[in-house]
Image (cartoon, rainbow, N blue to C red):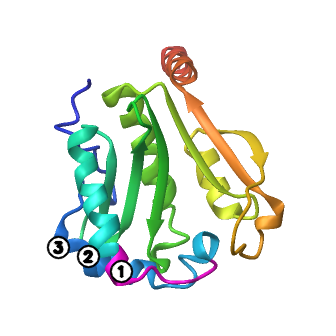
Amino acid sequence: MGGFGAGRPPGTERLRLRRLTTADVDALVELDSDPEVMRFLTGGVATPPVTVRDEQLPRLLAQYERHPGLGRWAALDRETGDFLGWFALDPSADGTEAELGYRLRRSTWGRGLATEGSRALVRYAFDAVGVRRVWAETMAVNERSRRVMSKAGLRYVRTFHLEWDEPIPGTEHGEVEYELRAEEWAALGQERLAARRAR
């Protein structure tokens, strides 16, 4: 394990990351009530408040103890303290892999915050937690998230198709998976070190 603190990834220039708490229910409900935020997740349908309060949040809070260093974190504006959304390194069953994710308020879009937070989590996942793989999935038509995955260092792996009871627009094009493995991360680190020495 590295030195970023007990189970909390480092913040960034513009973001402060902290664990979610039960006090975040209203902010999470508001986030999931924006049809544009939920467009590629539910087709724009909001998550019911009772689902956030009684199912999602308790599961996420319990995850902190089962998989120290991994989970989901509230993203706050470093200057104002405002809740902007969340970032995630959701653990695999054995905790050796993590799924990168994020959900941010529409008012933050276009400012590079998704990339900024995702890069910080990728670095933390490999250097501090020591996972063997970070991966992410989105709909193939979600170009914005695909760009964030690439900018965070993940590479395209595959396109695949799932069966949905209630498909949303775009599902016919499939889902995409991106990943970055520990050995690739280590090689990137050596390249960066060599580049610095060459200056």
Left/right of residue 40 with respect to residue 114 in the rendered view: right
The region drawn magenta spans 43-51
Callout 3, which amino acid? Ala
The crowd level at tag 2 (other Cα within 10 Å; few <14, some 14-19, many 20+) is some
Q: Is residue 4 visible?
A: yes
Q: Are marks 3 and 2 in contact (CB under 8 Å)?
A: yes
- As rendered, which of 77 and 177 lies closer to the eye? 177
Q: Look at label 1 and name its amino acid.
A: Val
Taking depth in this image into account, of 161 and 99 the one nearest to the observer is 161
Query: Which label's residue is closer to the chain start, 3 or 1?
Result: 3
Classify residue 69 as left or right of residue 133.
left
- Spatial CA distance of label 3 from label 1 is 11 Å
Distance, label 3 to label 2, CA atoms, is: 6 Å
Of the pair 124 and 167, the residue shown nearer to us: 167
Q: In the rendered image of this protein, does residue 68 appear above or below residue 142? A: above
Q: Which residue is mark 2?
A: 25
- Which residue reaches farthest right? 172
Calculate the distance from the C-alpha at mark 1 to the C-alpha at mark 2. Answer: 6 Å
Disc 1 residue crowd, few under 14, some 14–19, many 20+, Cα 10 Å? some
Name the residue tied to disc 3: 23
**Above/below status of 113 relative to 68:** below
**Residue 99 at x, y percent in the picture:** 49, 44
The 10 Å Cα crowd at callout 3, few under 14, some 14 to 19, many 20 or more, is few
Residue that numbered label 1 is attached to: 29
- Whether label 1 touches label 2, CB < 8 Å: yes
Whether residue 154 is situated above or below residue 53 in the rendered picture:
above
Residue 26 in percent (x, y) is at 27, 81
| Image point (49%, 83%), residue name | 46
Specify the amino acid type for callout 2. Answer: Val
